[in-house]
């Protein structure tokens, strides 16, 4: 049972030990300074609303302070921050390369020189309170299977959880996420469905697209109706889950190779949206035969020709390539 007061916590050996570890980590990371309470003064005397406001302020400032500190440390180690991905750091030294991807307080470390990687990890552990978790196998819900000839990334476990959430784990699978040439509008037949439930389903599908390019178009199309979904929209969204049921093992395979050529493809439909006659752009980029980014999105303007539609789509792809 957890203690309900300071007195109970102070009498608990496990809680005192946990507090000592926490204070040691705070001191090492220099999060803040621990000082004695001023004599004859109360530490806190304020209204609850003020406390909530101050806590909100602290929540906003804490991540910035952390990023600022670790950013300075990485720059001092001669890393260069990517101008396009602010959480990506690269260090090149002759033929050696090291890449750091930062997500809050998790770091992914990739390097061509194992000795330099070990030295970097020791440097980080001496500066921050960190634990080396070894080879990456699970990150942000993604499962990473590393092999001699390549790396396979998927969201198998998450997909299974989504199917259970919407009671679709035992449904009959289908071969395609959408019926070919399907047209949807905001005024589909059927009663209105719960917006929160529909948005939750679309949100889950959007997260699955992190390793599932095959779900990108269907999810993008269905996301257009989150403000006023009908039974028809919801039924089609659940049919996408039927496709997921038979493809939970799908993901992206990155084959080991010396060829690092970047290849991109772009395409578009013509006035595919029945609501506003706008077209949909799509692109996909591959490096070493592995898909690294993909997108399907309705264009922001109404094109007056098929040539203009393709030009808009190609421009989006070129921007992504750059």
Image: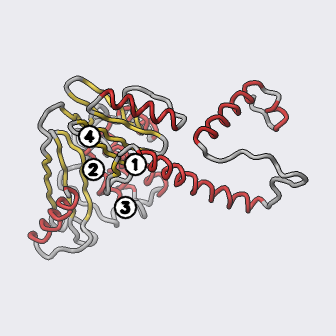
Viewport quadrant of the C terminus: bottom left
Of the two numbered discs 2 and 1 in the rendering, the one whose residue sits closer to the viewer = 1
SS category of the residue bearing label 1 = helix
Question: Horizontally, is 3 left or right of 56 in the view?
Answer: right
Q: In terms of image quadrants, where is residue 153?
A: top left
Residue at the far left: name it: 307
Q: Which residue is mark 3?
A: 225
> Which of the numbered marks, if any, corresponds to residue 216?
2
Viewport quadrant of the N terminus: top right
Residue drawn at x 35%, y 51% as measured from the top left: 81
Mark 2 vs mark 4, CA separation in Å: 38 Å
Q: Residues within 10 Å of mark 4 (few under 14, many from 20)?
A: few
Residues at marks 2 and 1 touching, judged by CB atoms closer than 8 Å? no
| Lower sequence index among marks 3 and 2 | 2
Of the two numbered discs 3 and 2 in the rendering, the one whose residue sits closer to the viewer = 2
Q: Residue 180: where, in percent of width, then height?
A: 18, 51
Mark 4 vs mark 1, CA separation in Å: 14 Å
Residues at marks 3 and 1 touching, judged by CB atoms closer than 8 Å? no
Q: Residues within 10 Å of mark 2 (few under 14, many from 20)?
A: many
Mark 3 vs mark 1, CA separation in Å: 44 Å
Residues at marks 2 and 4 touching, judged by CB atoms closer than 8 Å? no
Q: Residue 177: where, in percent of width, then height?
A: 26, 45
Q: Residue 15: where, in percent of width, then height?
A: 73, 29
> Which of the numbered marks, if any, corresponds to residue 260?
none
Q: Nearer the viewer, residue 64 or 94?
A: 94
Q: Which residue is mark 1?
A: 75
């Amino acid at each position: 049972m957890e203690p309900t007061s300071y007195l109970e916590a102070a009498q608990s050996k496990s809680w005192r030990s946990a507090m000592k570890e926490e204070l040691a980590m705070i001191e090492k990371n220099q999060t803040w300074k621990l000082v004695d309470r001023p004599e004859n003064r109360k530490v806190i005397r304020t209204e609850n609303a003020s406390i909530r406001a101050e806590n909100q302020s602290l929540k906003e400032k804490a991540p910035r302070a952390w990023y600022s500190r670790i950013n300075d440390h990485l720059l001092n180690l001669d890393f260069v921050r990517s101008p396009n991905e602010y959480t990506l750091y690269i260090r090149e030294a002759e033929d050696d390369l090291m890449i750091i991807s930062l997500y809050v307080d998790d770091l992914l470390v990739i390097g061509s020189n194992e000795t330099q990687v070990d030295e970097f990890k020791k440097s980080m552990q001496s500066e921050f309170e960190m634990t080396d978790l070894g080879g990456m196998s699970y990150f942000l819900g993604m499962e990473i299977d590393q092999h001699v000839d390549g790396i396979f990334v998927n969201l198998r476990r998450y997909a299974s959880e989504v199917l259970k959430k919407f009671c679709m784990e035992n449904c009959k699978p289908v071969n395609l996420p959408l019926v070919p040439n399907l047209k949807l509008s905001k005024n589909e037949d059927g009663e209105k469905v719960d917006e929160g439930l529909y948005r939750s389903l679309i949100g889950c599908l959007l997260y699955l697209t992190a390793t599932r390019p095959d779900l990108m178009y269907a999810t993008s199309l269905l996301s257009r109706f989150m403000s006023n979904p009908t039974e028809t929209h919801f039924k089609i969204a659940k049919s996408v889950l039927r496709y997921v049921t038979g493809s939970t093992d799908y993901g992206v395979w990155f084959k080991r190779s010396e060829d690092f050529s970047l290849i991109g493809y772009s395409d578009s439909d013509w006035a595919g949206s029945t609501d506003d006659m706008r077209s949909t752009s799509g692109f996909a980029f591959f490096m070493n035969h592995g898909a690294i980014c993909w997108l399907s999105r309705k264009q922001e303007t109404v094109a007056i020709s098929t040539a203009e539609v393709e030009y808009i789509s190609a421009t989006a792809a070129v921007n992504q390539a750059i």
